[in-house]
């Protein structure tokens, strides 16, 4: 069960705030992800030379870097097997990977956000493995 969405608010995703580091490609503030998150999204993770270090997710929509390590090795969008919604602007991009909600669906039907919020409160979400950002999908929903 994920604890990443266990609070009432959409914005406080963890009891300890995740570490941040500027993306070596674009300078945006990137958020630390678990190694397991990387493994769930990388193509051929068994071939990835992952070191014993922290990894980060770059949320900038225009930046082609998805993950990078403390040693500044970067993993670009072509090395990720998940379609990364955070790197797209089209309405079909996914906002919620746990329940498969696209941006256009979320905009048309506010009940979807209520459903996702309810499920995350019940601990039925799996953002830390399904969402390439490793963070709660609700963060990406329109306000
Ligand atoms: Zn970046």
Image (cartoon, rainbow, N blue to C red):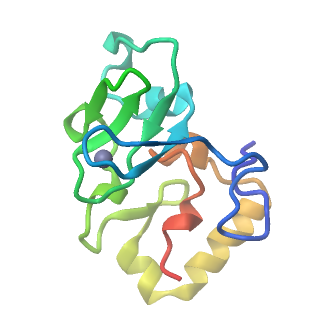
Identify whether 62 is placed above or below 90. above
Identify whether 90 is placed above or below 33. below
For the point 55% across and 60% down, which residue is it? 137
Identify whether 44 is placed above or below 74. above
Question: Residue 95, image x and y in percent?
Answer: 44, 64
For this rendering, which residue is in front, 68 or 6?
68
Question: Residue 78, image x and y in percent?
Answer: 20, 36
Question: Dividing the picture into quarters, in which one does residue 136 lie?
Answer: bottom right
Question: Dividing the picture into quarters, in which one does residue 68 lie?
Answer: top left
For this rendering, which residue is in front, 58 or 142?
58
| Left or right of 125 in this view: 88 | left
For the point 73% across and 51% down, which residue is it? 14
For the point 59% across and 77% down, which residue is it? 113
| Left or right of 49 in this view: 62 | left
Question: Residue 105, image x and y in percent?
Answer: 41, 78
Identify whether 101 is placed above or below 4. below
| Left or right of 138 in this view: 42 | left
Quadrant position of the N terminus in the picture: top right
Total number of numbered discs in the rendering:
0
For this rendering, which residue is in front, 6 or 69?
69
């Amino acid at each position: 069960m994920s604890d990443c969405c266990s609070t009432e608010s959409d914005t406080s995703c963890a009891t300890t705030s995740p570490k941040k580091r500027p993306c070596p490609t674009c300078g945006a503030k990137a958020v630390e992800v678990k190694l397991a998150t990387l493994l769930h999204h990388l193509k051929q993770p068994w071939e990835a030379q992952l070191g014993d270090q922290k990894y980060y997710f770059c949320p900038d929509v225009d930046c082609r870097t998805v993950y990078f390590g403390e040693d500044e090795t970067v993993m670009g969008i072509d090395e990720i097997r998940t379609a990364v919604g955070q790197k797209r602007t089209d309405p079909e991009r996914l906002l919620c990977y746990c329940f498969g909600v696209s941006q256009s669906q979320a905009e048309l039907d506010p009940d979807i956000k209520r459903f996702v919020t309810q499920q995350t409160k019940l601990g039925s979400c799996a953002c830390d493995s399904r969402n390439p950002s490793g963070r709660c999908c609700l963060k990406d929903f329109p306000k």
